[in-house]
Image: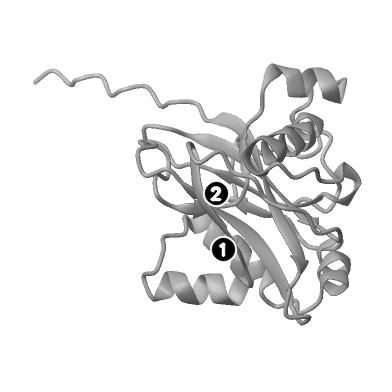
Amino acid sequence: MQRQNSAPVKEPVPAATAVLARRADSGGGIEVLLLKRNARLVFHGGHWVFPGGRIDAEDFEKAGAGREYPAARKAVLRETHEETGLEIDEDRLIHVGHWTTPPGLPRRFATWFFVCPVYRQAAVKIDHDEISDFRWLSPRRALQDAREGKFVLPRPTRVTLSDISVYDDLDELERGLRNFRIRVFPPDSDHYRPMEMGCPANAG
């Protein structure tokens, strides 16, 4: 019996996402910005995610280098502004993770995760097309709402929220994450090469 050739594994597209964290309006704790993706989208349609998207050629040009990590930092500034209307400070970006979509899915991404503390309040402006809604929620509340089935969080979003839910103050969050060991999935990912890509030494 002749074996059929298996379909080639789709290479993941480099991408970046930002976890925007601010002081809660109530005066205690932190809140993060979650966006609801339009239900018609192929990748995580209807799910609640952080702002972000693919790394474009212009991001590599702005970074002034061919390496992915500097371009990811530029991409996350651009994507955050496109999806929320917010301007964030690149100097405040803290690299906390890198997630690669498993093989076999129709869309695959190799995504750099950054936390960005936000100290200035500004209005969020979504396009009501790709993004249909937004919420500022505490990480613990977001996780609880997901457990209760109020909305769906992709695994990378859920794990990242769990990682930062231990912090009750924005300054504490920023200090704690500066020495945070980078969460990489899968741990042996061929798409995460921190030294080659110019990534900080605390990468795991």
- Kindly identify which residue carries mark 2: 186
Three-letter amino acid code at the position of disc 2:
Pro
Query: Who's the residue at 84% across and 34% down the image?
Result: 198
- Between 99 and 50, the residue placed more toward the observer is 50
Q: Is residue 201 above or below residue 27?
A: above
Q: Quadrant of residue 55?
A: top right
Question: Residue 189 placed where, x, y %?
Answer: 59, 42
Residue 102 is tagged as none
- Between 165 and 66, the residue placed more toward the observer is 165
Name which of mark 1 and mark 2 comes first in the sequence: 1
Is residue 196 left or right of 31 when viewed as pictured? right
Three-letter amino acid code at the position of disc 1:
Val
Question: Residue 37 placed where, x, y %?
Answer: 47, 45
Query: Who's the residue at 66% across and 44% down the image?
Result: 84
Is residue 68 left or right of 48 when viewed as pictured? right
Q: Quadrant of residue 44?
A: top left
- Kindly identify which residue carries mark 1: 159
